[in-house]
Amino acid sequence: MDKSLYDILFEPVKIGPKTAKNRFYQVPHCNGMGHRWPKSMAEMRGIKAEGGWGVVCSEECEIHPSSDLSSGALMRLWDDSDIPTHARMVDKVQEHGALAGVQLVHNGYSVSNRFSRIVPIAPTARAVRYDDPIQARGMDRSDIKNLRQWFRDAARRAVTAGYDIIYVYAGHNLTLLMHFLSPRYNQRTDEYGGSLTNRVRLIREVLEDTKEIAGDKAAVAFRFGVDELMGAAGIRCADEGREVVHMLADLPDLWDVNVSDWSNDSLTSRFGAEGHQEPYIDFVKKITNKPVVGVGRFTSPDAMVSQIRRGDLDLIGAARPSIADPFLPNKIKQGRADEIRECIGCNICTSGDMLSVPVRCTQNPTMGEEWRKGWHPEHIEAAGSEDKILIIGAGPAGLEAALALSNRGYEVVVAEKAAKTGGRLNREVNLPGFGEWRRVVDHRRHMLNQKANVNIYLESDLGAQDILDFGFPHVVMATGATWRTDGVGRENHFPIPINDTPVFSPEQIMDGVMPEGRVIIFDDDHYYMASALAQMIHDRGGEVIFVTPAVKVASWTENTLEQHKIQADLIRRDIPIICGQTVIAVTAGKFTLKCAYTEAKTGIEGDSFLPVTSRQSQDSLFDQVMTRQDEFVGRGVTSVTRIGDCHVPSTIAAAVYHGHLYARGLDNPSDQWTDFRRENQWL
Ligand code: ADP
Ligand code: SF4
């Protein structure tokens, strides 16, 4: 590869009084750690800087207790006592020559102030955004004056902490500044409401105030959602979004532009491709003389270069690509772009923030473990022995274990019964919109192909005797799991009676089998599988009814910011959705449903049954080996370990993590699951 093609990505960019050493810009992103696990957060940001990002920003940072995002764990600059937490992160980032940025925010009516108990505020009185049964009060002029002072105070603290870039944030419609801008939320009749000039007034004032405080010590960035993707009901880049850029053109030192809301900004690959924001944000650079950063799940250096050359962006923004591979910039610089662990756009990472726990990533098992476990994405301890390891199964768990073990220097053999590596993913990439998930396999296979200490044998269906014949000291079972077809899941604790009705498994549908007639899909899994199969069958011309005991379709995908889009997709396809009902029996095409609330029973009719309820580990080989344990010990086998779905069926992220955990812990006597540091601020 010609490294010089990418030289343009390593040019410095002046941002106000500061200069970024290159164009790689880690935009603000949540991580579920924030003020609650600040050492973990700082270490994670520091590793991004080490990996070559020219700018590394914090997540949202609440400027005042009236913007209290509890029970979430974001950053805070409520008072001076918060400064050291930020200074720690700034030091970690600047240590590697990167600029550190902080995203100051007031969230207006998008918070319930569950911890501070302060009455939420909004441009106009209204119910708070989330489900809490409380309202936000409309702000008077003294509130606006106070708000400006809070922004000034927070900016001053940010300067004291040493930040190079201070954000004024209206990037998502969760922010008070966006609430002032939008007629949906702002029905004021004073100088802050009505005309666009009036609705922009507060943003302008806060930008001016922040610039005054920042002086020559820090640059001021403005993060702005130029389009809410809701047509005339919201801000659009075709009219007011564009107008705002004209009105404030050269006021900020940097424009960070995106589409709103968060689910459109952090769009999953199921719903959009790399660079999907370009048509909305490409106008900005034509209006302002200041540098522009934007995101689009960029992982391809060629796409990055073309964004710069086409004049769309000055800086390549990234949140998820920097989570999946904190060393993405360095790999490009060193001519190792083929080694980038590309983000697959699954949004397991956003689930950390949504559930208020540290971020994890499907592609990068070290994410969130940098401080807790001392894991580094690019370094791993050398092998502690010359033991050989036999891994059975080349799905996500087996492949990650093989890669991490080989990085440690161990000699590894992988036996896979299928004709290709990939395990469950070989099927799941056939689901509509799941093609990018292939990267989990592609990356690992590519890296393993370069290893002299790894041999992969395909079409090798190993039995207990084969394992014995290998005689390797360590045996790893990564043989995966299969979907149950007996209805057992969260609601049904025992197999349900199914008579005279064809039953299909998710695997069969993914393999292309097409059930005849009306298919009753019963989703007691609540993640992506059932809805994706419903789309698949429908799009092949089949008829589907979607039944779930939950109150909505694919309810867990709230955490991956997809639920709304998935339900809308099924509705648009006219797929009937029956919520709050469990399939408890099927006889000759008659399905008995039990109400989740009253236990009342009703019936529907269908021609075939597709339960998506739970999975069972394929661990019979493990059991066979265990029954011959003495024989195995006698032949020098010292450990037999199940990992990934063979151990317990879970997400792909969990399987990758388990494979990595196994590899790190192979010669470590401590319990790898519990061996992590805790942040106890009282000690
Ligand atoms: P995980 O997500 O835990 O990695 P997968 O189901 O994706 O699990 O992958 C398991 C892999 O193990 C599959 O590719 C499957 O073909 C393979 N496998 C299962 N049993 C055997 C066996 N006895 N010998 C070799 N490979 C096996
Ligand atoms: Fe990308 Fe998925 Fe990792 Fe998030 S969890 S960074 S979307 S691969």
Image (cartoon, helix red, strand yellow):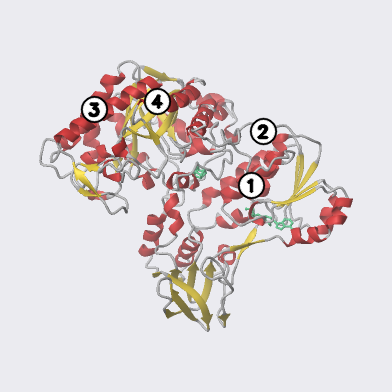
Residue corresponding to mark 4? 83
Q: CA distance from mark 1 to mark 3?
A: 48 Å
The reply, left or right, for residue 201 in relation to residue 563 is left
Location of residue 381 with respect to 508 vertically, above or below:
above
- Which residue lies under the disc numbered 1? 658
From the image, state whether disc 1 or disc 4 is nearer to you.
4
- The residue to which callout 2 is attached is 380
Q: Position of residue 375 (x, y in %)?
A: 61, 34
Q: Dot 3 corresponds to which residue?
A: 149
Q: Is residue 312 above or below residue 449?
A: above
N-term-proximal mark, 1 vs 3: 3
Identify the element where label 4 is drawn: helix
Mark 2 vs mark 4: in front: 4
* Residue 54 visible at all: no
| Mark 1 or mark 4: whose residue is earlier in sequence | 4
Q: How many C-alpha atoms fall within 10 Å of the one at disc 4: few (<14), some, or many (≥20)?
A: some
Q: Nearer the viewer, residue 1 or 592?
A: 592
Q: Which quadrant of the view contains residue 488?
A: bottom right
Q: Which of these two is toward me, 316 or 151?
A: 151
Q: Nearer the viewer, mark 1 or mark 3?
A: 3
Q: Is residue 443 left or right of residue 92?
A: right
Q: Is mark 1 within 8 Å of ligand 1?
A: yes
Q: Nearer the viewer, residue 7 or 382?
A: 382
x then y, percent, for residue 456: 74, 47
Q: Looking at the image, is mark 3 or mark 2 earlier in the sequence? A: 3
Q: Is mark 4 within 8 Å of ligand 2?
A: no
